[in-house]
Amino acid sequence: MEQRKKVLVIGVIGADVHAVGNKILYHAFTEAGFEVINLGVMVAQEEYIAAAIESNADAIVVSSLYGQGELDCRGLREKCDEAGLKGIPLVVGGNIVIGKQKFEDVERRFKDMGFDRAFPPGTAPETTIEALRELLHMDGETA
Amino acid sequence: MKPVLLIDFGSTYTKLTAVDVESETLLGTAAAFTTIQTDINDGLTEGLKKLKAKIGPVDFAETYACSSAAGGLRMVTSGLVPELTGEAARLASLGAGAKVVGVYAFQLTEDDLEDIREAKPDIFLLVGGTDGGNTECILHNAKMLAQMKPEFPIVIAGNRTAARQCQRILDGCEVYVCPNVMPKFGVLNAEPTQKQIREIFLTRIIQAKGLSKATELLSDIMMPTPSAVLAAMKLLADGCEGESGIGELVAVDVGGATTDIYSIAEGMPDHMNTVYKGLPEPYAKRTVEGDIGMRYSIQGIVDAAGMDKICRLSGLTEERVTELVEDLKVNTDKVPNGDDDLEKLDFALASGAVAEAVARHAGTISETYTMLGQTFVQEGKNLTKVKQIVVTGGSLIHTRQTEKIAAHALYDPAHPESLRPKEAGVWVDRTYILAAMGLLSLHYPQTALRIIKKELEYYGHSE
């Protein structure tokens, strides 16, 4: 039997309509062998959760490019716990905060919010793919 | 001449339609009371007598029938997430012509089982999980259902990984396995399940409902009436080989107990700055409003439209409206018969029913401001570009004000969020042939379409 591909739920959170990066990530993740459920832009927390439940997703990858990421992402981990998605890996990236801030601080804040990984602006898809492989214990597997 | 008889066993009336498929003409129609309690054939014989008195003696070459008698096709569904597989299951059942009497999401509880037992469904649709997705919920629900030793057939159309296991859990029950109604996230695949539902209806439910005595007379098809109407609407919109359709449409059927709305339209966003949210809806979509009907559900119309609106549309006082409504609740077979007030009230009720039911069927649009400026979010189908409205149902076809009532299906500037047709031509099914033509279309699509186009009255554009 064919091995089940790892399933990712991706999308741009909040009132954010930046669609280009989202499409690039969709193609990069698919190319890397993941099964990708792309929710597109303007995604509410509840939509990530609904899609992840229905598809038994292995991780949720949140993008935010308009600076409001910190507000939009708050509470996502708690809602996942509440919905029975306890421990599901959460990854976030993009222009997730406003202004010039030290990324270590930003990363720490997102980790405190329950995210497993946070990525700064300009991260190459390969870096995220590598991190997902590690998070999902896919050593040696293609996906 | 090759006469074909089409029968619609309704909850109250058995309606007969005779057509000649060679000359592509409607020969005549007749109706008699449905006699499901005694022998369904009594009403049918009575109807045939009336029909033959009108059109003369004929030997029918073929006979087809649809039915909504004895409660129609009652279904209960269960899915996982309410907005996803839960909604997919509901839409699939409605599209198969069912009356959905229960919708469940997530894991079924013992209390749910009690309610299901009481709802006495004809078919249970068990779904949940995309293919390769969640299996836990559907397996749990299969176990719960097995526990109640169901007498109704169960159609499994969820995560394919779990389908066979569900079947084993439900060993001893009548179980059918179909492809997933939502194989991938956001993708609906309802047709195989709907086909299975219709087959069960044909083989099992017809018998259980005492309709089998009539089947000796039938050539082969027996389907739920709404399913026949949906087939007719698809044919009228899309056309068939050799005969063109009229394009995307919305159809409205206001009945005594419920109001059915059909839309045959893509309905996706038509602007770059509009984002679509939620489950994409089927091209041929049917919804039923169980609380909106001209007699049994009269209070539902008043509640939904508001007393003010009913008074304004009818020109009657609140006291008079209340008095008439209370009377109609009891005397459900009362029709306006030269009674001026009743006619005014029926006009207001029908208008209110059309406006509310179409608004619930159509999608909505909302405006939001983002860092990049104004954006629109659309949920459900955008019907603003639909140019044709088809109306049927006693309250609409037996009045001279059909066109005015139908106009309430249109876009309302006071509710710009509701994506209803902006302007449309109105087609009226005065002879009540839509279900019959849906039946006929399964074997004679071209003939059925030509008869529909000939028989429906067209009333130009409304705005």
Image (spheres, rainbow, N blue to C red):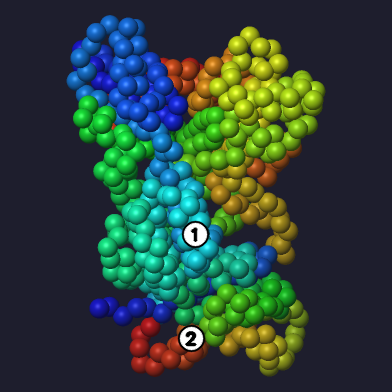
Instruction: State the residue position of label 2.
Output: A132
Residue B172 occupies which quadrant of the picture? bottom left
Give residue B147's quadrant in the image: bottom left
Q: Quadrant of residue B235?
A: top left
Residue B32 as seen in the image, left or right of residue B195? right
The residue located at (47%, 21%) in the rendering is B429
Horizontal side of residue B253 vs B60, given as left or right: right
x and y, in percent, of residue A50 in the image: 54, 68
How many numbered discs sit on the rendered protein?
A: 2
What amino acid does circle 1 point to?
Glu
The three-letter code of the residue at mark 2 reads Leu
- The residue wearing badge 1 is B114
Which quarter of the rendered picture does the N terminus of chain B lie within? Answer: top left
Q: Quadrant of the C terminus of chain B?
A: top right
Q: Chain of mark 2?
A: A
Q: Is residue B366 left or right of residue B34?
A: right
Q: Chain of mark 1?
A: B
